[in-house]
Image (cartoon, rainbow, N blue to C red):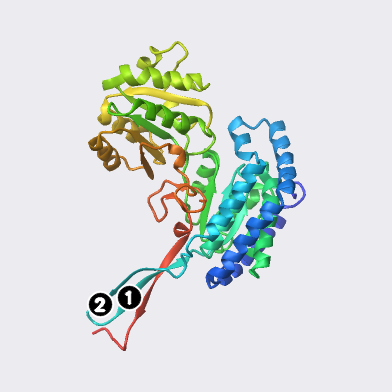
Amino acid sequence: MLNKTEQSEAEITAIMQEIGRNARTASRVLATAGSDRKNAALTGAAEAIRNSVSKILDANAIDMANGEEAHLSKAMLDRLRLTEDRILDIANAVSAIAEITDPVGEVMANWQRPNGLDISRVRTPLGVIGVIYESRPNVTADAGALCLMAGNAVILRGGTDSFNSSRAIHQCMVKGLAAARLPEEAIQLVPVTSRIAVGEMLKGLNGNIDVIVPRGGRGLVERVQSDARVPVFAHLEGLVHVYVDKSADLEMAANIILNAKLRRTGICGAAETLLIDVNDADRLAKPLIEALLAKGCEVRGDEAIRKLSGSVKPASDEDWSTEYLDTIITAGLVDGIDGAIKHINTWSSSHTEAVIAEDQQVVERFFNEIDSAILMHNASTQFADGGEFGMGAEIGIATGKMHARGPVGVEQLTSFKYVVRGSGQIRP
C-alpha cells in the first residue's frame, strides 16, 4: 500500500491521470463486448472469489485489527467485517449479475413518423464510472460486476479502512477479466490511500470519468456532492421510517419492525424511526416498544412513548433526524396517516419508508403522498437492496430524482441514444 507520505501530490496526480486514460480506453472495448465475454468475466471472477476465501479473510483480519485500533464504531466495523459466508455471498452476487439480461443494445422504445422515419431509443453504457466508498469491501465486487455488465469501465477508490480486503477482492475481479480476454483496466482499484486521489477523481480525470457514485457516510457524500465536477448518483443517509396504522396486524407489525431495525443495524435500509397510530395506541404501542427493548434495542421516544416504559429515553429534535446505524430507534405517536405523512415529509431523507396496515386506503395515501425512492407495504425495510429487488446487486441507493433513483443496478448504469433510420427523407 502506498500512502501519502511516500508519494508527492504530483506523483499521485500522475497515477490517477493514467488510471483515467486506461479506463477510457477499456470502456471503448467494453461498449462493444458481447454478453458472452462479460458473462465469462463475471463467472470467472465469482469462481476466483470462492477459491480465495482464506486469502480474503487474512486481508480482512488486517483491516479489522487496524479498525479496532482506530476505534471505528460498531456499525463501521460491522460493515468492514467479512466472514466465509459473507465472502460466498459476494461471489454469489457476482454470479447473479452474470445471469441478468445484458442491458446494452436494448431497444427501449421504437416508433415511426408519418414521413417514414423509424426512430429507436437504444440503451448504451455511460462510459467510465468512479466509485468512492468507505469500509464495505463487498462494494469492490458489486460495483465492478455491475459496471462491467452495463458495459462501463470503473475506477474504485475504497476506504483506507478496507484497503487490504478490497485489494484481495479486486485481484479476483481482474482474474475474471483476464480469463475472458477483456482489458484488466476495465476494473481498476486506486492503489493509494491519499485523499489527493479522491480530489483528482472529483475533478473528472481530464474528462475521463462520466459519473461519480459515493457510498459512505454523510461527510464523504457531502464532499463529493460539493466538489464533484461530474454528475453524482448519491444519497446522504437512510433516515428510514416505519408507520404502524391502527388497521395493522400486531404480530405482523412486531415481526417486521424487529427485522427492519435489528437484522443488520449498519445498513442504509435499517429502520431508524417508528411511528405508531395514536388512534389504537393501547393495542399497538406498548407491545411494540416492549418487543424492541426485549431485544436490546434502545428506544428514544416522545412523551407518550416514554409513559409506556421507564426504559424509554427522551427523544430530542436531533434524534428525529439521526441515522443511527446502531441498536437505537426513535419512536413516537402520530395522528393516523395524516400525522405519519406530515412527519415523514418533514424528516425524511427520501430513502425508504414503510407502512404496516390492512386498510388499503391508508396504503394508497402513503404511496401517493410520500415521495421517497422506495416505499413498502407490510414488508421489512431491509429489503431496500438491489439484490433483493432482483437486480443481482447494487452500487447504492440513489435518492435524487435525476436519471437513477432507488437501487442503482445495471439498467441505472446505462444511458441511451436515438437511432433514426430513413429512406432518403429530407426536411422541407
For the residue pair 75 and 191, the one nearer the viewer reads as 75
Q: Amino acid at mark 2?
A: Arg
Q: Are marks 2 and 1 in contact (CB under 8 Å)?
A: yes
Cα distance in 3D space between marks 2 and 1:
8 Å
Residue 223 image position (x, y, % from top left): 53, 44
Residue 345 image position (x, y, % from top left): 33, 35
Residue at x 42%, y 35% (from the top left corner): 240
Q: In the image, which disc is placed on residue 176?
A: none
Quarter of the rendering containing residue 381: top left
Residue 426 image position (x, y, % from top left): 28, 86
Residue at x 46%, y 67% (from the top left corner): 124
Q: Secondary structure at mark 2?
A: loop
Q: Which residue is mark 2?
A: 113
Q: Is residue 383 visible?
A: yes
Q: In which quadrant is the C terminus drawn?
A: bottom left
Q: Residue furthest bottom?
A: 424
Q: Which residue is mark 1?
A: 119
